[in-house]
Image: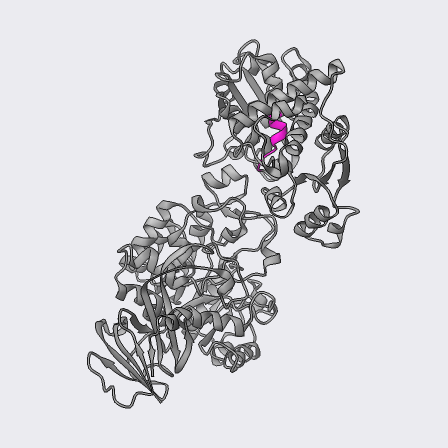
Amino acid sequence: MKLLLKNGRILDPSQDLDIVGSVTIVDDQIDEVGEKVDERDADEIYDCTGMWITPGLVDLHVHLREPGFSHKETIISGTQSAAAGGYTVICCMPNTDPPLDDPALIDFILDRSASPEAGGVFVAPIGALTKGMKGEQPSNLASLKRAQIVAASDDAYPIQDAQVMMRCMELCRQLDLPVAVHCEEESLTRGASMNEGAMSAMLGLKGMPRTAEEIQVARNCMLSLETGCPLHVLHVSTWGSVEIIKQAKFLGAPVTAEVCPHHFSMTDEDMVPFDTNWKMNPPLRTQVDVDILLGALADGTIDCISTDHAPHAAYEKDRPFDEAPFGIVGLESAVGVALTYLTHKGILSPLETIRRMSTRPAEVYRLDAGTLKKGRTPVAQVTVIDPDVEWTFDVSRTFSKGKNSLYHGMKLKGKAMLTFSGGEVYRDALWAANDRVAV
Amino acid sequence: MHVLSIREMDPETIDSLISSSLEMKKACRSGGSVPNLSGRVVGMLFLENSTRTRVSFEQAARKLDLGICVFGVQGTSMAKGESLKDTVLTLRYEGIDGLVMRHNCSGAPYLAARFFGGPVINAGDGMHEHPTQALADAVTIAEHKPSIKGLTVAIVGDVLHSRVARSNLWLLSKLGAEVRLVGPRTLLPRHPGHLPVSIHYDLASGIEGADVVMALRMQKERMDGGLVSSMSEYALMYQVNARSLRFAKPDCLVMHPGPINRGLELDDWTADGPNSVINEQVENGVYVRMAVFAAAFESNNGKPKKSQKKAVKA
């Protein structure tokens, strides 16, 4: 079986490649990438004129909700959503019920994600950093690592005790396992539901001060410097966090960082008052933060873009703002938001956009992904993106079970059209409409 | 017409509700006629403790012959875990025409308004707004001062947690008053940028030359949270009393949304003194709620009529 992706703009940050050319996939593996490839005997030809051909996108921060919360999302629906968003590798967070602190649970996730109904993309699980995510006793991290976790985290339950954190990081340093951290000093955020600022003062909602995030970013960066443990700072949202991370990197701490599409595209001023689809943690901040985050993406202080895809059932979000759960879905809007707010605004070049969404995140968790180099990924992982298509994001047409998105009804420019993980795992309706497939 | 917040209410509507309230008062006192809303039933969904506001709404409804149905969490399906959305939908399809809602979460009435067909009146939501209280305060001020425009109003105390303050500051500034927030740094918003107010940490300078001083209730749980050191420390710095009132205008009105902690926000002399209009605020609350009911129900299915004043007279 030979697939020919013809005449697209090939963007492969892993080899700084930005050329117009073609890609062939033979028996689920990348065969040729270049201006001229052997086009003979192709079983299927995809005319990619005007499209980008990129390594499959990689998302380090996804909540698949299984086991325990399958009313919000399942591994099946979540991986389908990922494929539709152009992702070929997603890392799932351990805040399930029970939390992913047991190798058997990792086996379950890997099994389920390989099932034929699933989206056909790779799931790389993140293990719980502490047992039960209670922030007390480290998990059996060596066993979890053998079960194939790619990082450890107590995401959503940030460890408050610095001693516990330091010990966990020592253990992870020994195992060479990145530690991913949601940074929040909880004594400053109890009962809070949005950014502390002019908007929260106006709406009478208790706000989370930016310092609650920054205090823990600073602590964790210093612990990383002290222990040498690779630290990945999840969903950076404030300018202060950016400055601290920049300093930590300057000092030589093995620190990486990610930003979510909503944090670089929206502010608390944009939010529809009391609409719970605008409630997430960390919350939307202010324009100053957005400006600094954009600069940090451009200069590499922020390594990558992750979605923090956090699906919830409608009945959970249809509650008073204080009582509704945090989080929004992101897998199927991320490409549109990133291209609309980064690439088309000239913040990142097309190649750098793909670097932050594919190559760099793969490097952060040392995944066999994020490249079009032959033989470097278990199977061919390729995404075809139409950078110029204008479309309206509609949650009723998404694969995720969660319909909680603030982007619903918004116009975006740029969309994943085809996703290949081995073979084709997703083909967008807009692609067929354009009659681009020739056999 | 929903009455969810003063922030989103235009000054014309505020003016018309104030004058309609004054007409209700006149009519009630002189035995004149008030609108008759018989045949309609309003649901009183009080999901947080309240005596004065609930009774005030009930009294207003009675005077308009408006049927009422009172609910708390206890004794309703919400105690069985029914969501607010489903409770509201149930009331809607049981034929309840309007909803008065008190809730401990800011913005909860907005959720109710999304699912309830008829008008929703916010009777206090979390730390957000308490529109009818602000209207009662404005009516009280209007009775004593030639105009709200140009007045200086000092709101003193726990503004951070106060829905009364958040409604009053919008209402008064929309009608042209200068609003000052006065209190300790821990109880004033740290980012007041969107609020049409000035911030004063010192009581004397905050109420200097004020035409109206509104003291807010200090809740005991705020002390426990360490927001102020002690009751006596707070009283020392922020109590509205004869000593501090020397800085305000001699005919300054002293107001309080109640319930008062005597000896804390106000001393006895001030609460019962010649400048105090606290009992009038309570009385006017009933007329304001009558005016709000009339406006809410006499505007066809949420579409406001051109002249609510006329409708009230009819």
Residue B18 vs residue A125, the one in the foreground: B18
Is residue A183 shown above or below A111? above
In the rendered structure, the answer to whether residue B228 lies left or right of residue A197 reads right
Q: Does the magenta-highlighted stretch encompass residue B131?
A: yes
Quadrant of the rendered structure where residue B52 is?
top right
In percent of width and height, residue A153 lies at 48, 66
- The residue depicted at 48 percent of the width and 16 percent of the height is B150
The answer to whether B186 is drawn above or below residue A58 in the figure is above
The count of marks equals: 0
Q: Quadrant of the C terminus of chain A?
A: bottom left
Left or right relative to B312: residue A301: left
- Residue B169 in percent (x, y) is at 53, 27
Residue name at image x 61 percent, y 33 percent = B130
Tell me if I can see residue B267 in this picture: no
Nearest to the observer: residue B251 or residue B221: B251
- Name the chief secondary structure element in magenta: helix
Please report the residue visible at 59 percent of the width from the left and 61 percent of the height from the top.
A313
Q: Nearer the viewer, residue A419 or A187?
A: A419
Percent x, y for residue B217?
63, 29
Does residue B128 show up? yes
Residue at the right extreme of this rendering: B75
A240 relative to B133 in the view: left or right: left
State yes or no: residue B20 in magenta: no
Give how far across and how far down residue A301 sits, in percent.
31, 58
Q: Is residue A106 above or below residue B138?
A: below
- Depth check: give the residue in front, A59 or A154: A59
Residue placed at 54% from the left, 32% from the top?
B9
Which residue lies most toward the top here? Answer: B250
> Which stretch appears magenta?
B128-135
**Which coloring applies here?**
one colour
Instruction: Check the picture and name the quadrant holding the N terminus of chain A.
Output: bottom left
